[in-house]
Image (spheres, rainbow, N blue to C red):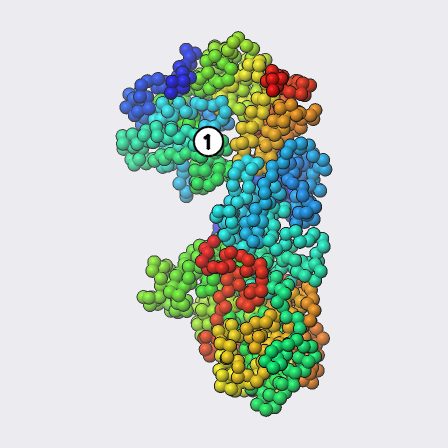
Amino acid sequence: MPEPTTAAPPTTVTITIDGKSMTVPPGTLLIEAAKQSGIDIPSFCYYPGLTLQGACRMCVVLIEKMPKLQTACTTVVANGMVVHTANDEVKNARKAMLEFLLTNHPLDCPVCDKGGECELQDAVFRYGAAETRFLEIKHHEEEKKFSNLVYYDRPRCILCYRCIRVCDEGMDVNAYGIGFRGAHSEIIPNHGDKLECEECGMCIDICPVGALTSGTYRYKTRPWELTYTGTICNHCGDGCKTTLSIRNNEIIRANNRDHSGFNGEFLCAKGRFGWDFVNSEQRVTSPRIRRDGKQEDSTWEEALGTTVARLNNIITRHGADSVAVIGSNRTTNEENYLLSRFTRTVLGTNNLDHHRTADFSSLVGALTNSHATDRYATMQGVATASSILLIGNNPTHQHPLLAYQIRQAVRQHRARLYVINGDEIKLRRQATLYVQVKPGGEADAVRALICNLGPAADLLAAGSTPISAVAEKLKTESNTIIIFGDEIRGEMVGELVRWGLTLPGRTRFIALGDYANSRGAADMGLLPGNLPGYSSITDREARAYFETVWGEKLPVKPGRDLRGIVSGIHAGDIKTLLVFGSNPIKTLKLDGNALSKLDFLLVADLFPTETGALADVFLPATSFAEKAGTVTNTCGQVQAVKRTMRKPGTRSDLEIIMALARQFGRKWPYNSPDDVLREMIAKVRGYSIALPTLLLGGAVATVPEGIPPALERVDLISTSGDSLFTSGTVSRYSKALNSVEEAKRPHDHIF
Amino acid sequence: MGDYENYLKGSPLEVKVITRRIGIPNSASIDVFLQNDGYKALAKALAMKPDEVINEVKNSGLRGRGGAGFNTGMKWSFVPKQSAKPKYVVCNADESEPGTCKDRPLIEFDPHQLIEGVAIAGYSIQSNQGYIYVRGEYRYLLDILDRALQEAYARGYLGKNILGTGFNFDIATHTGAGAYECGEETALLNSLEGLRGYPRVKPPFPAVVGLYGGPTVVNNVETLSNVPSILLNGADWYSKLGSAKNGGTRLFCLSGHINRPGVYELPMGFPLRRIIEEVGGGIPGGKKLKCVIPGGSSCPVLTPEEIDVPMDFDSLSKIGSMLGSGGVVIMDEDTCMVKAALRISRFYAHESCGWCIPCREGTSWLKTLLTRFHAGGGVAEDPDTALDVAFNILGKTLCPLGDAAALPVISILKKFRHEFEDHLKLGACPYERSAVTAS
């Protein structure tokens, strides 16, 4: 929360609305005061969080002692104000505004995308008149295609300017303006006749009518034919709540109109449009077994049977440590927890890793060492922070919600943002101070910041703000949130945390990892040396604890990390590799022969990826939309993923791991993801989360604590560097994301 | 210029205060200006305390000549003394009200009087920067103004340390791009800042949050042109020129069906009937008067029975109209009032900026309805619908443009309803009957 700066002003104002007396804080807008006491004042242009327009005149009310009707959206309450919101004069004015709006409106509600969820329709239904007196010819304009994802229909537009404002004030993109004048005014892109923007679709979402429509949704359905399920977006690590609209077992759109979740209504291009990989015809829906060098469709029974037989054979011949497992940073916590259990107990090895995109382990270790595990920041916390230090990463591309939250903090709470980056990232525009280092110089910059040293002469880009200026300013701030990308890893994390904790107030931290569940993968121990909950496999007590929980012995020998697994394959020590929801050929930039020495390769995935194409057994997995569970965002907040549809032929990773364990003769006590979650809540340190909050759609912050093994090689931590339009392998299968012009050169655009 | 100068030939009934230099050869040059009391008022003002200047203007009863008629000194006094942001004086030279052409000669023939007024206003609110925002169609005036500014700088009446008093003041000119709306003070400020000329939400008023967020006084050309005379001759002298609470003189622009159209400087409160009959020399061809717009097209029209009215802000307000910008438009008995309403509506529909719903949609509706009606396509409900539409605009728009569009139409529909009925009965315009039959 913003810190109070001056002496307390008068605390309340008493006003009367429709005979009801109420007290509200001074400075409250009349329209909000009315809302608080359950009195609805209609409006189109007024939108909480955006600047005031006074344009639609729907919210006019009668204020006693005022000469004419006043707009409730621009009027600040004053003591003793007596307001009437429903007398005849006000009602007639509202009706008149609606009559005006409908004069040139096409009234094509029967085919309009917005029909059934249109604010104009609702307002006319509630306040308007059924008959028209407008006998003239309506203005007509042809529909315009602003981009493959955004269409504009001028006749439907009521010119509330929400799109312009959300794009400018919310997104800092400013893609829209107004063209022409008077009744011929229309919304136009600011660059020629096409949008050049982040394609987030916020403009479509916020449009109260059917003026801005979505290239992927338009004319497809009626909203009342859809079923809606709230779940969590699978793309980046921010964990946006999204409501998937399903018809006939197919996702039709995604938005978050109910403002649930910490992202409110925010979704980026990937969240709003990039779910269509789920519907891709390239999804694999039948298990495949390699026969004579070629993958052929088979049955689940045969594929699983073959896998278990091959695994048994190899483990018997070469020992358990000839097996390695690579997990995913998109699969659910429950799946990751079971994969950790499966690898260590059923397979009997610690050769388990995943593509690590942030050094969560070092953050947990550092905070635990400093007795400061209450200092994990939340996504909501960022939006109301007073001071933010952002080191590395490019949140605009890699963490769109986080970037949005930072902008909110700066715009609405006057937060100071300090940026240290090797690139001219867009968020520098919001920065109070921006230190531009040479590419890759972030860690050195942090060292200079901490030691208060003059940095090496060649560290800063020409003309950059000195690092000492940031150090000095941060000493005057309090409650700073320090956010860092993969540039800060290993012991640098510890140094940064120790220094950060010496700053005034409650400094909090966020490490930025990619994809929906990078954090959960680390939390659940998809790491060679980590058990779930960040205890070390070499810690005898921790091992004993999980041996009790799981009822089996755990292997003592430290496992191989991702690089070690690859070199082990090369050396012939690793004979079998199991890959769940990952594409190491691509992420590790391996050549196709890197896996050729394997005796057996199992891949469970959605698509025939580069790695999947090499598999001896390929198991078609379900996507995030087809399974239940939980994921943990980059801040460590757990949220529930819900099943919204089914994809015949596929199975979730959880079902796959359970089936494999069963075939290995294990009788695990789980019948559903919920059973696994309950065990995690009970047994994994930091995960004793409130189930009701989770089930009601809330985000529950975890408090991980532990001393995991130190990071041995920094090159194990690397971001995928996704853009606004990419999301690792899956975005390749999104038609919508690939249809966007800006996606061709995403980093060339400064919107 | 030939014709135009005819309009400035004047009348013996005039009381020349701000037009007194018009007619002198080279009146726009600083030398002629200086020979005729030029910049004496500025020197006098700079010797006074800023508050004393404001009080002098306040006591003179000078009221805004742009149309709203707010006491000018009072407006200046609303500017906060202390301000973290710079304060500004903005001269509104976006003269666009149909029937109004008074600012044009003031700039063309006496630009230094205006510059002096702006500088005095700047001193009184302790601003160091003034702007003169000239309407796009007055581009040619820009050269005159810019030349005058150069002269004023060269002679030390603008710039640093003016007249050795330590007061610094700069003036820059800026043109609009041809939008009536930019005459509305907050839209003007947006336009001046390089934004689209949309009005701003008020409050805050420009006096507190104006140009670039700084406290800003926005005054009309004629208003500011009066300031030097007030300072030179005193508030008392000025206020006595006009009627009660309506200090000074005012420029009236006579146009329409009148024998001597032109711009005349008359004392505030001069009777409208005498303006038409004596100053303007009556109606051509001895025709009868049908209607008068007293102060620019946004004012409710007056019938011949209503013209025995003193032309000042309060008297016109009392009879339900406005003094406005001083544009007196006279219409004779052969004028079709439906067409007059249509012509006015067409202007406002064209000029509506489109920002708020009632003005954007309402003006356009009125225009199309009246076009159809006047062309003979009217239905019985139309007059009532038009009246209702106008009332639904009235008082509900963000800026006064909506009221400006609604008021004249309402007055015509109320006072000349019978002409609408005539159109309906005839199925065509009675005044254009011959034309209709011919076609």
According to the picture, the residue beneath numbered tag 1 turns out to be B75
From this viewpoint, is residue A554 visible? no
- The reply, left or right, for residue A518 in relation to residue A226 is left
| Label 1 SS | helix
Quarter of the image for residue B25 reads: top left
> Residue at the spot x=54%, y=44% of the render?
A187
- Chain under callout 1: B
Q: In this view, does B157 lie above or below A298?
A: above
Residue ID at (65%, 58%): A252
Q: Which residue is drawn at 58% across and 58% down?
A: A736
Asked whether A165 or A565 is in front, the reply is: A565
The quarter of the displayed image where residue A277 is located: bottom right
Q: Position of residue B402 (x, y in %)?
A: 57, 31
Residue A296 place in picture, x, y as percent: 64, 77
Residue shown at 49%/59% (left/top)? A744
Residue closer to the observer: B10 or B237: B10
Residue A687 at x, y = what percent? 61, 72
| Number of numbered tags placed on the structure image | 1
Q: Which residue is more in the foreground, A689 or B356?
A: B356
Check the image and report above or below for A154 versus A579.
Answer: above
Amino acid type at mark 1: Lys
The answer to whether residue A380 is left or right of residue A490 is right
Badge 1 density bin: few <14, some 14–19, many ≥20, Cα 10 Å: some
Residue B241 % position (x, y): 43, 17
Instruction: Tell me if residue A427 can be seen.
Output: yes
Judge from the rendering whether residue A434 lies leftward or rightward of residue A680; answer left or right: left
Question: As rendered, which of A730 and B15 lies closer to the eye?
Answer: A730
Asked where in the image residue B128 lies, by quadrant, the reply is top left
